[in-house]
Structures are given as C-alpha cells and as structure tokens.
Image (spheres, grey):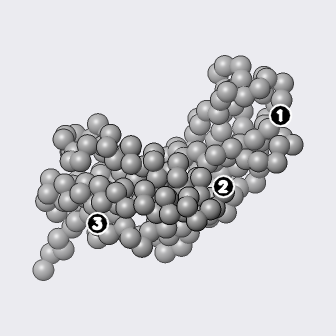
Amino acid sequence: MATKFKALIGFARMKDDELVVLANTVISAMTDNTNFAQPSPALSDVQALLDDFTERLSAARKRGSPEETALKDESRQPLEAELQKLAYYVNAVANGHLSTLLSSGFPTNGERIPALVPLRVGNVKMTDGRQSGQARLDFAKQRNVLLYEYQYRKVGDPEWSDRMATSSSRANIIAPLEVAHRYEARVRAVNTQGTGDWSDIASILVR
C-alpha cells in the first residue's frame, strides 16, 4: 500500500527551542507560498503567538522565576494549538502530495530525518557591510539544517546579544554597530534533532 504523506501535527514533545525553530520555519516557508494561498489560521496570528512565546521564553531564561516559567508554559499552549490547526490546513490542501507538504516547512512522515544533531559550523567570517556601522556574517552551509542561530557582542563585553535566526549562510547583516569598535560573532546550526555547538568566534573592526 502506498504511503499517505501528511504533515505531522504533534508538538508536545518538542523542546521550547525546537518549537520556536519549527514555527519560524513554517511561517517563512508559507509566506507568499502559492501552494497555500489562504492559510488558516492566518500566519500573522501564528506570528503574534510566536512573538509572545519567544519573549516569555527569553524572560524565563534570564530570570528563571517560577512565575515567568509558568507564563512561558501558558504562552506555549496557544502556539501549539494554532500550529496544529495550520498543519490540518496544510494536510487538507496538499492531499498527500509530498513536495507540496514539504514546501510548508512542516515535518512530514515522508521526510528523511537526520539521526544526529548538526556539526559545528565552520568558516565563520565577518566582513564590512555596505554601510558604515554594519558587518556581514558568512559561514559554511550544512545539509539537513532547519535554521542557524548567531549572536554578536562588542569585544570585551561579558554578554552576548539575543540569538538571531537565519536560514541563509551568506550575507547576514549585523547592525547597528559602533564605528571604530571591534565586534565578534558566533554561529550554531539547528535541526530536528537538536542544536549544534557554537562555532569558533570571528571578529571585525567596524568601519
């Protein structure tokens, strides 16, 4: 019997970081996707729930009080529910067509899932951006990666910036930065099995 392909709709076992990565991937993949002309629920509604969850997740990690952890968990529930509704919509539209399903960004029962977490990202470079006060971040691309996360800071500062997410290994612009100060950045890859180690640090004197 032929396999009936479908988007997976269970997210309860995902770690918080994995849920954030999935939601970002789905929203990016379905935005202006002609396969899914009228997403239900609207992607803007899912984005609003994702923004709220990401904010509460960050607060819970920085301060870690029981109240903030509870607020984070409460924020996760509606995001999971809306993603599940969106997955049902994707399944209804795709009707088992694998390439259409994969274009949604949802994991499917027809996908080959990598067995290991990503390797450490290599060849991390910072170069001048097109404008003063900018830096460009490039690094080696990896296969079977959902997203990359990167952070930056002024050399000598104890704290890194919030984690930024990107699907591209090239031409990531970091701005605004202070001119005549040296900045550094690091990158790691994320797939469905987890998060890789942070890369070696690259740096640049901002012009």
Along the viewing direction, whichever of 205 and 178 lies nearer the viewer = 178
The disc label shown at residue 9, or none? 3
Q: Kindly identify the amino acid type of the residue bearing the numbered disc 2.
A: Lys
What's under tag 3, amino acid-wise? Ile
Of the two numbered discs 3 and 1 on the same chain, state the one appearing first in sequence. 3
Q: Residue at x 50, y 63 (%)?
A: 70
Could you tell me the amino acid type at mark 1?
Answer: Arg
Residue 133 location in percent, x, y?
Answer: 71, 23
- Any mark on residue 134, and which? none
Query: Which x, y percent locates residue 166?
Result: 53, 45
With 120 as the anchor, is 38 left or right in this view? Answer: left
Label 3's element? loop
- Name the residue: 18% across, 41% down: 38
From the viewer's side, name the closer residue of 31 and 156.
156
Q: Is residue 160 visible?
A: yes
Determine the secondary structure under disc 1: strand
Hey, which residue is sitting farthest bottom in the picture?
1
User: Is there any visible trace of residue 189 in the rendered image?
Assistant: no
Q: Residues within 10 Å of mark 3 (few under 14, many from 20)?
A: some
Residue at which label 1 appears? 182
